[in-house]
Each structure stands twice: as structure tokens, then as C-alpha cells.
């Protein structure tokens, strides 16, 4: 005897399947720093200092599953728009490749969208929060808001931010993407991030019945606190060192 399945029953089954595969918030465990969890807090008990040219991303969840490619690195640069060129990535250590926008054929990664060449999404202004502004799949931590970032920039660097230009990097095949739990990937840029720039990360791990989402809380976000010397300054410094060396040799011979 054949059993007929009604259209309504099929719809209910598909809805149940979708719900069973819903996202789950695994935790705000992607810590940023040089290395992460060091350097002391900058803004009360929140925000870690990072170099303009290098930062580390730590998956601080012990035993966490490997993250799906790509791992996203997100920066917020104060008071810049689409005309600003974010620095490229020089290298990842101990493994991986990375770049602005999309370095792989992922389409709209994890539900978010941004310029696939420049990595630029847009300007986050008052009332905004970085993960939801990008349209990334949630649930996510909501503490990386314009309100928190601008308050920290004012207090730490004296920068009055009216907006943050948001740029996204795709990091592929990092140690965090290949083995989960207490692993760190170091990111080196080919030029410096401006002072007052925030850095956070976002990633997903496939689960049996859902997708696990990991991100960075405001407490463990990174903030650039050092100024990269201008090329002219470096030339003057080099010339000064050469002159000092010549003077020192002359005095030594005397």
C-alpha cells in the first residue's frame, strides 16, 4: 500500500529541518593583540594595543572545531571613507594567505557583503554595530559598536570619530582554519594602519546540527596606538644615523 505525503506535511518537515540547522553562538573567543591577551587594557578593562603593522588573532576556545575558510579580519578606521586604501596583507604566520575583499570564490561570505577588491563595506556611524552592519550571520556579540569605539578613541588617542570606515580581509588556511582551539595566527600588513584603528575577527565552524559562530568582543578587540613614521621621517632618521656614524669614526681615529 502506497503512502501519500501531503504538501503541508512536506512543508512542515522542511521547516523543522531548517530550524534544526540554525546558527548557534559559540562565543566571543577570537582575541586580538600583540600577542593576544597581552599589553594591558587601554580603556578601563577593555581593548588591547596593537602595532600598526602586525597583530595576532587567538582562537581562545579550547577544543574548538576548525573554522571554515575564510576567517574574517575586520578593521574600523576612524574618519575615512571609500577613498581610503586599507593596507594589504604581507604575510600570515605560521600558515595561510589573505587579502582585502575576497581571496577565494565564496560569493557573499557568511551572509555579509562588501567590495570584493578593496574590502570596503561603508562607514559605520552613530547607532551602528560592526557585525550586524556588515550583514554577517548571527547571533553575534554586539559590543563592537560605534558608541564604544568612538569613546575609546577619544579617551585613548584624543580622536573625535564621527564615523569608522569598515574594511574586511579574508584569511584562508590559517592554523585556526585547520585546527581549532588555543591557536594563534599572526597577520603582518604591507603598510601601517592609522592610529585609532580597531581590529576584530569573525569565523564559523560547521556543526552536526548547527553552525557555530565565533567573534571578537570589544573587551579583546585591538586598537592601534603607535604612529607609523612617514617616508620622509625615515629618510631623515637614516641620514642622521649615517652622519653620526661618520662623526663617530672620525672621533675614534683622532
Image: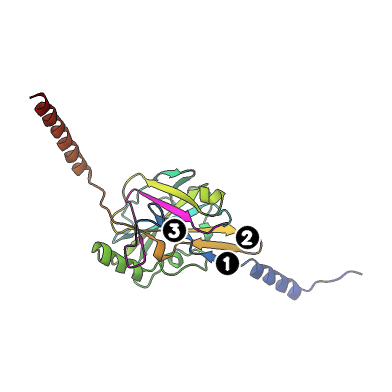
Q: Are marks 1 and 2 in contact (CB under 8 Å)?
A: yes
Please rate how many residues cluster around mark 2, counting C-alpha atoms within 10 Å: few if below 14, some from 14 to 19, many from 20.
few
Q: Are marks 3 and 2 in contact (CB under 8 Å)?
A: no
Q: Which residue is mark 2?
A: 207
Q: Are marks 1 and 3 in contact (CB under 8 Å)?
A: no
Of marks 1 and 3, the one in the foreground: 3
Q: Secondary structure at mark 1?
A: strand
Residue drawn at x 34%, y 48% as measured from the top left: 53
Residue closer to the observer: 244 or 84? 244
With respect to residue 3, does 55 lie above or below?
Answer: above
Marker count (numbered): 3
Q: Compare marks 1 and 3 and give the one earlier in the sequence.
A: 1
The rendered magenta stretch, by its main secondary structure, is classed as loop
Give the label on residue 31, or none. 3
Residue drawn at x 40%, y 65% as measured from the top left: 219
What percent of the width, then of the height, locates residue 12? 71, 74
Residue closer to the observer: 210 or 244? 244
What percent of the width, then of the height, locates residue 34? 37, 52
State left or right for residue 16 relative to residue 83: right
Residue closer to the observer: 165 or 226? 226
What percent of the width, then of the height, locates residue 229? 23, 47
Q: Which residue is mark 1?
A: 24
What percent of the width, then of the height, locates residue 180? 55, 53
Magenta segment:
40-62
Residue 46 highlighted magenta (yes or no): yes
Residue 140 in view of the camera: yes
State left or right for residue 33 relative to residue 181: left
Amino acid at each position: 500500500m502506497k503512502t501519500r505525503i501531503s504538501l503541508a506535511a512536506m512543508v512542515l518537515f522542511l521547516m523543522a529541518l531548517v530550524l534544526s540547522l540554525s546558527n548557534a553562538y559559540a562565543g566571543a573567543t577570537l582575541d586580538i593583540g600583540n600577542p593576544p591577551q597581552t599589553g594591558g587594557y587601554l580603556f578601563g578593562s577593555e581593548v588591547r594595543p596593537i602595532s600598526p603593522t602586525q597583530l595576532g588573532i587567538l582562537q581562545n576556545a579550547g577544543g574548538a572545531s576548525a573554522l571554515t575558510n575564510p576567517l574574517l579580519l575586520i578593521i574600523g578606521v576612524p574618519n575615512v571613507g571609500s577613498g581610503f586604501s586599507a593596507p594589504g596583507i604581507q604575510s600570515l604566520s605560521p600558515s595561510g594567505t589573505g587579502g582585502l575583499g575576497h581571496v577565494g570564490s565564496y560569493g557573499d561570505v557568511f551572509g555579509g557583503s562588501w567590495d570584493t577588491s578593496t574590502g570596503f563595506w561603508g562607514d559605520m556611524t552613530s547607532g551602528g554595530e560592526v557585525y550586524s552592519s556588515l550583514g554577517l550571520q548571527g547571533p553575534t556579540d554586539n559590543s563592537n559598536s560605534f558608541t564604544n569605539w568612538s569613546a575609546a578613541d577619544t579617551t585613548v588617542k584624543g580622536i573625535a570619530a564621527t564615523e569608522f570606515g569598515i574594511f574586511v580581509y579574508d584569511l584562508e588556511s590559517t592554523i585556526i582554519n585547520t585546527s581549532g582551539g588555543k591557536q594563534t595566527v599572526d597577520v603582518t600588513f604591507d603598510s601601517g594602519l592609522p592610529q585609532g584603528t580597531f581590529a576584530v575577527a569573525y569565523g564559523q565552524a560547521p556543526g552536526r546540527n548547527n553552525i557555530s559562530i565565533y567573534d571578537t568582543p570589544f573587551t579583546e578587540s585591538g586598537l592601534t596606538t603607535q604612529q607609523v613614521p612617514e617616508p620622509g621621517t625615515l629618510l631623515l632618521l637614516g641620514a642622521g644615523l649615517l652622519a653620526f656614524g661618520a662623526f663617530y669614526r672620525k672621533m675614534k681615529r683622532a
